[in-house]
Image (cartoon, rainbow, N blue to C red):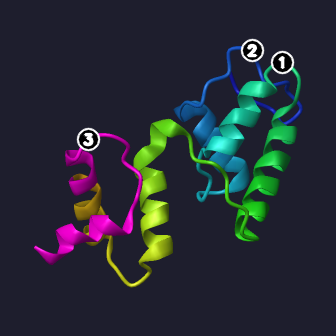
Amino acid sequence: MKQNLTDTIPHNYTNNQINRAFFKSIIGNNFKFNTPFMQWMNANKGIKTYQDAIDTYNKIKLKKKDGKKYTIGKQFKYNQYTRDFFENNSTLSRPDCIKCWHYKKSLGGEAIYDKDDLVVLEK
């Protein structure tokens, strides 16, 4: 089914490749599903239109650009770890972050960034 901007978001909406392609065709190639947008979509199935969704996506992106931080879901612990790592270690590299992440995961328990994780970089 081809979406139109005036169509109501269907009750069976999913964040799939067809919908990704639709949003990219309107918003541009920089479109990415993000947690706040996906939550908004799920909450507004059968209520809001695709135009409302695009307006909301643009508002979310503007807020993020202005420095708004959104809570990262628990299922995305690596993303949260990475965010926290670089907020505390802006001069370190992505490979450093990944090495610390693997170290932290090997310890068991919560994989939450801590400055003590940097010990693995000294080895």
43 to the left or right of 29: right
**Along the viewing direction, whichever of 57 and 39 lies nearer the viewer:** 39
Residue 3 at x, y percent in the picture: 74, 30
Q: Earlier in the sequence, mark 1 or mark 3?
A: 1
Q: Is residue 71 above or below residue 17?
A: below
Spatial CA distance of label 1 from label 3 is 42 Å
Magenta stretch encompasses residue 110: yes
53 to the left or right of 70: right
Q: Residue furthest left?
A: 123
**Along the viewing direction, whichever of 92 and 16 lies nearer the viewer:** 92
Q: Is residue 91 above or below residue 110?
A: below
The answer to whether mark 2 and mark 3 are in CB contact below 8 A is: no
Q: Which residues are magenta?
A: 103-123
- The C terminus sits in image quarter: bottom left
Helix, strand or loop under label 1: loop
Mark 1 Cα shell of 10 Å, populated few (<14), some (14-19), many (≥20): some
> Mark 2: which amino acid?
His
Image mark count:
3
Spatial CA distance of label 2 from label 1 is 5 Å
> Mark 1: which amino acid?
Gly
Helix, strand or loop under label 2: loop
- Residue at 82%, 47% in the rendered image: 56
Magenta stretch encompasses residue 7: no
Q: Which residue is label 3 attached to?
A: 108
Q: Earlier in the sequence, mark 2 or mark 3?
A: 2
Residue 78 at x, y percent in the picture: 40, 50
Q: Which residue is label 2 attached to?
A: 11
Q: Which residue is label 1 attached to?
A: 46
Q: Nearer the viewer, mark 2 or mark 3?
A: 3
The answer to whether mark 2 and mark 1 are in CB contact below 8 A is: yes
Q: Is residue 94 above or below residue 108?
A: below
